[in-house]
């Protein structure tokens, strides 16, 4: 029982039986505990209330109308069960849904395109970040949100390199990952991040959420 308690507990909400079972098998192979796998938004809310998982994997479009049932259920979870991480999967980038999900409480949220599930390491890494209170945002989601947010250019105070670092943070990269992607030392990355916090007026009192708040500021949500 102690071993199971340390494993990530997940609820899956996906109406496609084939994809749902595929995600279940993938997560179990990664030593996660799938406490429930359901096919609609109401069942998702019931499962979350009953099991209080570490994180949910939620399809945006589910029965009965296949429009935004999953997204609306995800927003309810964010409001009523803030300790539960929510990772939304979508077939396409839907800017309005992404903005609604990301805005509000910082941390514990992700929005990935479904084809990212095929990259098991990336998917599991994102899921663990969300379960731990971090963020996992698909690069395509970031790009589309930036088209909107850059119209007002809210980040003009940041240097181009600082914006590169913040974009990498938005993609969920660690300091080491950012250093590797930008071909710089980790010390330089830490300095850039400190400057970003300073320029965006995110004080140390914002604690561990500063990184997520910086990303949200970047996305204009």
Image (cartoon, grey):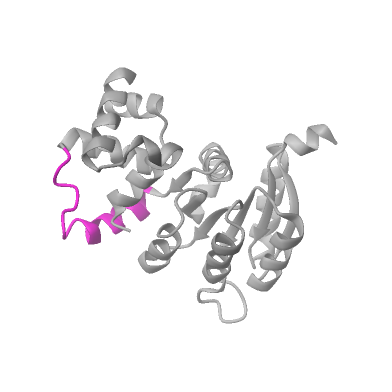
In the image, residue 11 above or below residue 167: below
Residue lying at the far right of the rendered structure: 1
Q: Quadrant of the C terminus?
A: bottom left
State the residue in front, 88 or 27: 88
**Which x, y percent locates residue 92?**
42, 63
Tell me if residue 140 is in the magenta stretch: yes
168 relative to 21, above or below: above
Closer-to-camera residue (61/161): 161
As for residue 3 lying within the magenta part, the answer is no
Q: Residue reaching furthest bottom?
A: 65
Query: Of residues 63 and 214, which is closer to you in this image?
Result: 214
Q: Is residue 118 visible?
A: yes
Residue 182: which quarter of the image?
top left
**Horizontal and vertical percent for residue 180?**
34, 24
Looking at the rendering, which quadrant does residue 189 occupy? top left
Q: Is residue 61 left or right of residue 41?
A: left
Name the residue at 67% across, 65% down.
44
Where does the magenta region start and end? 139-158
Q: Which residue appears at 75% of the width and 55% of the height?
A: 51
């Amino acid at each position: 029982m102690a071993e199971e308690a340390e494993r990530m507990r997940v609820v899956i909400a996906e109406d496609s039986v084939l994809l749902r079972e595929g995600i279940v098998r993938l997560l179990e192979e990664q030593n996660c505990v799938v406490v429930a796998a359901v096919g609609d938004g109401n069942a998702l809310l019931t499962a979350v209330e009953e099991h209080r998982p570490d994180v949910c994997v939620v399809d945006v479009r589910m029965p009965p109308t296949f429009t935004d049932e999953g997204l609306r259920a995800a927003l309810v979870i964010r409001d009523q069960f803030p300790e539960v991480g929510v990772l939304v999967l979508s077939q396409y980038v839907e800017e309005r849904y992404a903005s609604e999900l990301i805005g509000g409480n910082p941390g514990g949220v992700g929005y990935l395109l479904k084809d990212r599930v095929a990259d098991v390491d990336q998917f599991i890494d994102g899921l663990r970040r969300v379960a731990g209170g971090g963020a996992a945002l698909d690069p395509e989601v970031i790009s589309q949100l930036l088209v909107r947010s850059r119209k007002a250019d809210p980040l003009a105070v940041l240097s181009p390199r600082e914006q590169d670092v913040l974009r990498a943070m938005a993609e969920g990269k660690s300091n080491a990952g950012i250093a590797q992607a930008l071909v710089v030392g980790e010390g330089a990355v830490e300095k850039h991040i400190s400057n970003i916090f300073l320029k965006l007026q995110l004080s140390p009192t914002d604690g561990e959420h500063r990184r997520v708040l910086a990303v949200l500021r970047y996305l204009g949500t």
